[in-house]
Image: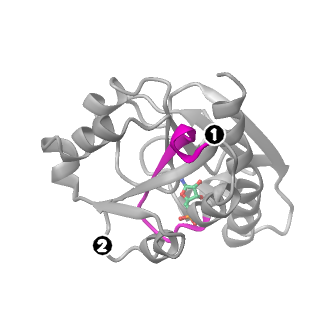
Amino acid sequence: MSHKNHKKVVLFASGSGSNVQKICEYFQNHETIKVTHLYCNNSKARVLEKVTAFGIDYTLFNKAELLDSDKVLEKLLKTSPDLIVLAGFLLKIPKKITEKFSNKIINIHPALLPGFGGRGMYGINIHKAVINKKEKRTGISIHYVNEKYDEGANIFQKEISVKEKDTPLTLSKRVLKIEHEYFSKIIEKILNGGK
Ligand code: GRF
């Protein structure tokens, strides 16, 4: 496939970007899929250096620009990505974007949705809640994004067991490892599997 026929993935991230790193590595020399851009709301985020090392450009914006202007929407419409991937993106995607890119935005969540999703359920809070509730299983969910937090249809889940001696920190590390293992493969499957 020539370069211009590659399917285009754009990433949204706010933080350290370990998933972004893995995704960029996975698709670096891919035959049919290319990571073309990063959208980020945090000018100090470590993810910016990560994509730059892969020669990928980024667009910075703040919360007000995302919500009250069409800066992000217009850029997305102009570049027409095949898939928008939220990889540790902390702001809510506004309706004007979700309705234009219906079934084209996916997110990864470090728990088994619909459990442990929604308001306040991010980062270490999730793993604390899982342990406090004495859950035996946790895992990851990759799901479509609609205008409600964490409520779009699930695409993929992978479970792991919560061990007696797990702390929120040990659990978060094991869950993140699973994210790294599966996220790129699921992106590839969505784009190349005809869905
Ligand atoms: C991941 O746990 C992901 O599930 C959640 O945000 C975290 C991002 O981590 N949505 P990183 O920035 O990819 O390291």
Query: The residue tagged with tag 1: helix, strand or loop?
Result: strand
Let me know if residue 76 is in the magenta part.
no
> In the drawing, what numbered circle is on residue 30?
none
- First in sequence: mark 2 or mark 1? 2
State whether residue 126 is above or below residue 189: below
Q: Tell me what residue is drawn at x 64 percent, y 60 percent.
A: 28
Q: Quadrant of residue 156?
A: top right
Q: Residue furthest front?
A: 2
Q: Is residue 95 visible?
A: yes
Front in this rendered view, residue 38 or 105: 38
- Name the kind of residue labelled 1 in the image: Ile
Q: Tell me what residue is drawn at x 63 percent, y 33 percent.
A: 191
Q: Is residue 136 visible?
A: no
Residue 26, position in %: x, y? 70, 58
**Side (left or right) of 84 relative to 169:** left
User: Total label count?
Assistant: 2
Query: The residue tagged with tag 2: helix, strand or loop?
Result: loop
Say which residue label 2 marks. Answer: 43
Let me know if residue 14 is in the magenta part.
yes
Instruction: Determine crowd level at label 1: few under 14, some 14-19, many 20+ residues with C-alpha closer than 10 A.
Output: many
Say which residue label 1 marks. Answer: 142
Q: Which residues are magenta?
A: 1-18
Residue 163, position in %: x, y? 86, 60
